[in-house]
């Protein structure tokens, strides 16, 4: 999720970003360090539906917190894309 929210393009890019926050990794449940091989193995072994379910949960949270009705259309998802 951190990689998605911070627009990381590769595992190597994600590792560099997490190393910048190495003091916080333990509190995020990631242990003391994160390696590319560990992330790669985790991606192979985890079922995508775990993340899909969490994404739907986060969308529901965003809809409930939103003050306008812009997100209330069923089946409509909004994507925020950072321009380079």
Image (cartoon, rainbow, N blue to C red):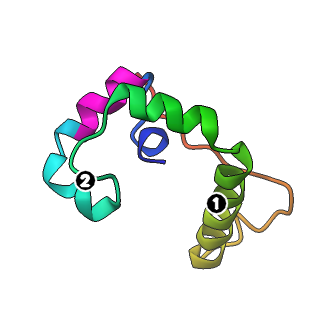
Label whose residue precedes the other's in the sequence (2 or 1): 2
Query: Residue at the right extreme?
Result: 74
At x 86% / y 56%, what residue is drawn?
A: 75
Crowding around mark 2 (Cα neighbors within 10 Å: few <14, some 14 to 19, many 20+) is: some
- The C terminus lies in quadrant: top left
Whether residue 54 sits left or right of residue 34 in the image: it is: right
Q: Is residue 31 magenta?
A: no
Question: Circle 1 — which element?
Answer: helix
| Residue 74 % position (x, y) | 86, 63
| Residue 79 % position (x, y) | 62, 44
Vertical placement of residue 27 versus 31, above or below: below
| Residue 17 % position (x, y) | 26, 35
Numbered range of the magenta stretch:
11-18
Camera-nearest residue between 83 and 38: 38
Question: Circle 2 — which element?
Answer: loop
At x 45% / y 23%, what residue is drawn?
A: 9
At x 63% / y 43%, what residue is drawn?
A: 46
Magenta portion: prevailing SS class: helix
Vertical placement of residue 84 versus 54, above or below: above
User: Could you say which disc has been placed on residue 41 in the image?
Assistant: none
Q: How many marks?
A: 2
The residue that mark 2 highlights is 25
| Residue 41 % position (x, y) | 51, 32
Camera-nearest residue between 56 and 78: 56
Q: Quadrant of residue 63?
A: bottom right
Camera-nearest residue between 28 and 5: 28
Marks 2/1: CA distance? 20 Å
At x 30% / y 38%, what residue is drawn?
A: 34
Crowding around mark 1 (Cα neighbors within 10 Å: few <14, some 14 to 19, many 20+) is: few
The residue that mark 1 highlights is 54
């Amino acid at each position: 999720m951190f990689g998605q929210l911070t627009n990381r393009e590769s595992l190597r890019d994600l590792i560099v970003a997490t190393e910048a926050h190495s003091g916080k990794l333990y509190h995020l449940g990631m242990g003391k360090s994160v390696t590319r091989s560990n992330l790669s193995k985790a991606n192979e072994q985890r079922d995508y539906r775990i993340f899909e379910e969490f994404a739907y949960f986060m969308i529901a949270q965003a809809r409930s917190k939103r003050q306008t009705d812009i997100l209330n259309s069923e089946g409509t998802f909004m994507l925020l894309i950072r321009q380079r």
